[in-house]
Amino acid sequence: MKQERVILSFIMVLIGLLVAGLAFYFYQSTKVVSDRSNASIVSTPTPTTAPIIFLSISNPINESVVSNKTLTVSGKTEPEATVIVITESGQQVLQPSSQGDFSTTVILSDDQNLITVWALTPNGESTSIQKTVTYSMENF
Amino acid sequence: MKNKLFITLIFITAGFIFVQTINAATLTPTQPTIKNQIDELKTKIASKVAELNLVEKRGIIGVVTASSDTQITLSDINNNVRIVDVDEITKFFSSNSKTFGISDIKTGTRLGILGLYNKQSRRILARQVNELTTEAKIIFGGVSVLDSKNFEITLIKENEQKIVIEVADLTKTYSYSSGNLVKFGFSKIKLTNTALAIGFTDKNDPNKILATRLIILPDVDLTSRINLAPSVAPSIPPSTGSGMKLFPIKR
């Protein structure tokens, strides 16, 4: 009788461990990482004085290095805006398409080139973006 | 009772053995050598790709804020602090000096850097350092003063800053209207015209630009934020009854 009780206790302990182990396994496998942990990382955007008119440059990429002297400058702005592309040696004035797209080519000087794009609306609002493009044939 | 307990014990033991067998079967690869080789190759390729993607050629322009024998700190065109490392194979170029080197770089020097940008450390290992000339200023504003005698115009910006633009013989003046960019004379410039001036700051007057290019934009109106009305400032101090002039206290 006493021996039976010992065995029974042993079995019950084993069953208990097994059940606890299974419960833990299922808890771990079904656990979903909540997005709240990331929420603390997201900072509140500070209000900035956003330009009144929209201007984005799709090409060239800032700080890019190119091996071709002819460079396409393209982007998007307000359809009614006047776009002025200024390089160290010249300037081009463009009218964007009805969708606001514009594109032109400029000739680069050797080494670093600073390309400034201005967008001006008929009511005098303005914004500008500067990009650095380096012309180089160096291999390193 | 004893039999029942014995059977239960056998079942539990069998269950454990079954679970262990399944685990062992899933963990042990069927073809260990080939799979290991594939995994090893994948790891090598991934690390090589990561290494190649970690650095890229970049060119930046900036003004020196600090320099040492091995490092230059710049403020780039977006006013970001950029750290440039210099080593023994970095080449230095200047149009002013053939012996231009790291020791000639002073605070305020404008440099163009070409090198390898490390995306992880965000530093550039310079392969070429060029001394650049002063950056051209671009001013957009409304014409508030026309000085035909000195060939100067004053542009007022959105922030109400007034910049005097000197139009010299070398200044190329254009007008952009109805989609055409045409050459333009100083005499045709009108008050309240909007203009974009490109030039260099006068060494003697920081509020004066020596224009190399001037684009008049008659089709672009003045923004409502630019006020061309002359500021009402009392030039004559108010008089007291005793005839003494009262001047404001200047601190």
Image (cartoon, coloured by chain):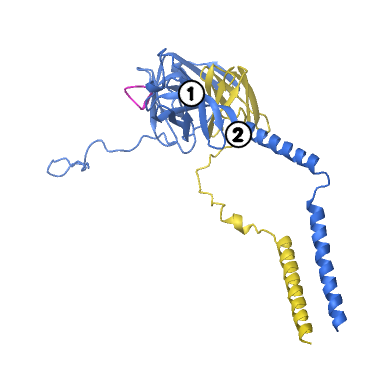
Q: Residue lying at the far bottom in this picture: please name it.
A: A1
Q: Which residues are magenta?
A: B201-208
Dots 2, 1 in contact, CB < 8 A: no
Q: Which chain can be seen in yellow?
A: A
Q: Which residue is mark 2?
A: B54
Q: Which residue is mark 1?
A: B112
- Secondary structure mainly formed by the magenta segment: loop
| Left or right: where B231 falls relative to B239 | right
Q: Which quadrant does the C terminus of chain B fall into? A: top left
In the rendered image, residue B225, in percent from the top left (x then y), is placed at 46, 38
Tell me what residue is drawn at x 59 percent, y 31 percent. B55
State the mark number for residue B186.
none
Q: Which chain can be seen in blue?
A: B
Residue B205 part of the magenta segment: yes
Does dot 2 land on a helix, a strand or a loop?
Answer: helix
Q: Nearer the viewer, residue A107 or B147?
A: A107
Same subunit, tags 2 and 1? yes
Residue A102 part of the magenta segment: no
